[in-house]
Amino acid sequence: MSLRPSVAVPMATLTLPITTFIPEHYARVVGLDLAVIGATFMFVRLFDIAIDQVLGLMMDRTATRWGRFKPWLAGGTPLVMIGAGMLFFPKPGYSATYLAVALIITYIGYSLVILSQLGLAAGLSNEYEGRSRVFSWWQAGTTAGLVLAMTTASFAGGKGIDASFAVHSMGIIVIVLTPIGTALALRFIPDGTTRSTNQKMGTSINTVI
């Protein structure tokens, strides 16, 4: 059970600074106008809402020897790392286009990781109590990620460190913890939708019939 929220921790650590620290960071360090930053976030989020539907449909139609969700989890991880590397470490003078590209890559990777993680979690139990325990662990991991992000920001502010240090630190946490969490999920969490499992189930049904 303790390995199930492993991906939730870095994903929660990612979402908090995107909404609370990144806009201010791009205004202060990069020099973008807040209105431009807000418009960029709005358009990217609208794109993300649309792309989530497409990604969900693609996952539903996936059937591989590794399962339905694990290939997407593995594929989304490097996108999160690349997006976080771009998003949390901008240089002064970067344009709104850079911010938009960084956000798109980050959100696509995030959607892939979160949707596949939730798909894996839902398949761990068919019982109400079992699923409740699974998602309780998932919520615990999400809470831990939020606390980690807030603690990092609070430490930087309390010590009088440059605010950029907090943003960079949260980016490093996401980049380091995401592949670790993914590796643990791929290794220890079963995917009940593997093609071999479905074939065995079909063979058993045909035998019974």
Image (cartoon, rainbow, N blue to C red):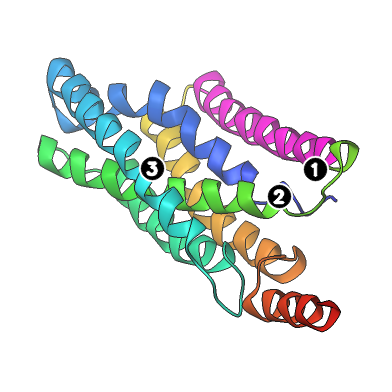
For the stretch drawn in magenta, the main secondary structure is helix
Spatial CA span between label 1 and label 3: 24 Å
Name the spot of residue 66 as percent of width and height, x first: 61, 76
Q: Which residue is mark 1?
A: 134
Per the image, label 3 sits on a secondary structure element best described as helix
Q: What's under tag 1, amino acid-wise?
A: Val
In primary-sequence order, the first of circles 2 and 1 is 2
Mark 2 residue element:
helix
Residue at numbered disc 3: 53
In this rendered view, identify the residue nearer to me: 160 or 60.
60
| Mark 1 neighbour density, 10 Å: few (under 14) some (14–19) many (20 or more) | many
Three-letter amino acid code of the residue under disc 2: Ala
Task: Decide if residue 96 is on the left or right side of residue 84.
Answer: left
Q: Which residue is mark 2?
A: 121
Number of the front mark, 3 or 2 = 3
Dot in front, 1 or 3 = 3
Asked if residue 94 shows in the view, the reply is: no
Residue contact between numbered discs 3 and 2, judged by CB atoms under 8 Å: no
Whether residue 133 appears in magenta in the rendering, the answer is yes
Q: Which residues are the magenta region?
A: 131-159
Please name the residue shown 68% across and 30% down the image.
Answer: 143
Crowding at mark 3 (Cα within 10 Å: few <14, some 14-19, many 20+): few
